[in-house]
Image (cartoon, rainbow, N blue to C red):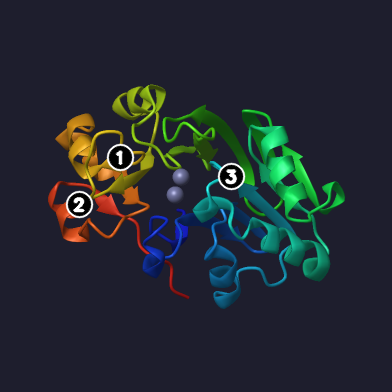
Amino acid sequence: MFKFVGIGSAFNTEKGNTSAFLKRDNSLLLIDCGETVFHRLQELNLLDGLENLYIIITHTHPDHVGSLGEVIFYSYYILKRRVTIFFPKKQLIEGFLTSIGISAEMYKLNSFERIAVNDAQIGEFSIEFLPVSHVDTIPAYGFTIRLNGRVFYYSGDANDISKIALEKLKNGQIYRIYQDTCGLDYEGNSHLSLRRLCEIIPQELRNKVYCMHLDKHIKEKEIQNNGFNVVKIYEE
Ligand SMILES: [Zn+2]
Ligand SMILES: [Zn+2]
C-alpha cells in the first residue's frame, strides 16, 4: 500500500530519512519530509505534474521536516500548487515555516486531530493523530489512516506503541502497523527497540507489523527472524 522513499533513522542517512508515500495519478500523499526526502522525490520523479500534494507531519525533528520547506517552495513556484500540511500543533509548524522563509499563502494547514479528505485520485481517506512518547522537547504523533476500507497505523518516532492502536490491532480493526524500530537498546531510548517490540507484539500478530526508521545497529534478518516485516526502499 504505502511505499517508502527512505527507511533509515536520523543518523542512518544511507537508507534515507524514513518517509512513506502513496501516489495515484496526479495526487501524492507523503508522510514526513526529512532532509533527504526532497532529493529522493526529485530522483524518482514523484513530483512531476502533481496537482494535489498532502503531507502528514509526525513531529518537527530534522529527519522528518528537514526538506519540507523545499517541497513547499517547489510546489508553489514550479507546480503552482499549494501543499496541504496535516499537523496538530498549528503554532509550532507555522513558526517553523515562517523561520525558513515560507509565508502563509504558500501552503494550506489542517491542524485538526481528526481529518477527512476526499481526493479526486486517492479517494476518501481519514486521519486520526495519536500523541506518542518520543522526546521531552517537542510533541510527537503517530496516526491511524483509513484508506480503501483498511486502517493503517503509522508510529512516527515513538518508543512505545499507542495503547489504542495495540487494542485495535488485537481486535482486527487495524490492518497493518508501521513502527519505528531500532537495534540500540538502553534506558530512556526515544525509539522502540526490537527487544521491546517483541515484548509488546504477540507472535501471531507480528506479520502485521512493518519495521521502519532503522538504525545502523539492527539487521533486517534479525527483524524477520522474530516474525516482523521490514519496509523496503522504493526503486523506480
Ligand atoms: Zn526520526
Ligand atoms: Zn524524532
The answer to whether 39 is drawn above or below residue 27 in the figure is below
Residue at the location (60% across, 45% down)? Answer: 56
Residue that lies at the very extreme toward the right in this rendered image: 105
Amino acid marked by disc 2: Ile
Q: Earlier in the sequence, mark 1 or mark 2?
A: 1
Residue 133's image quarter? top left
Coordinates of residue 194 in the picture (x, y in percent)? 22, 44
Q: Marks 1 and 2, Cα distance to the nearest angstrom? A: 13 Å
Coordinates of residue 93 in the picture (x, y in percent)? 68, 41
The answer to whether 188 is drawn above or below residue 52 in the figure is above
Residue 119 appears in the rendering: no
Coordinates of residue 163 in the picture (x, y in percent)? 36, 23
Near-viewer residue (21 or 123): 21
Few, some or many residues within 10 Å of mark 3 (<14, 14–19, 20+) = many
Which residue position holds label 2?
Answer: 223
Near-viewer residue (155 or 234): 155
Residue 106's image quarter? bottom right
Classify residue 172 as left or right of residue 186: right
- Per the image, label 1 sits on a secondary structure element best described as strand
Residue at the location (43% across, 73% down)? Answer: 235
Residue at the location (73% across, 58% down)? Answer: 72
Q: Marks 2 and 3, Cα distance to the nearest angstrom? A: 26 Å
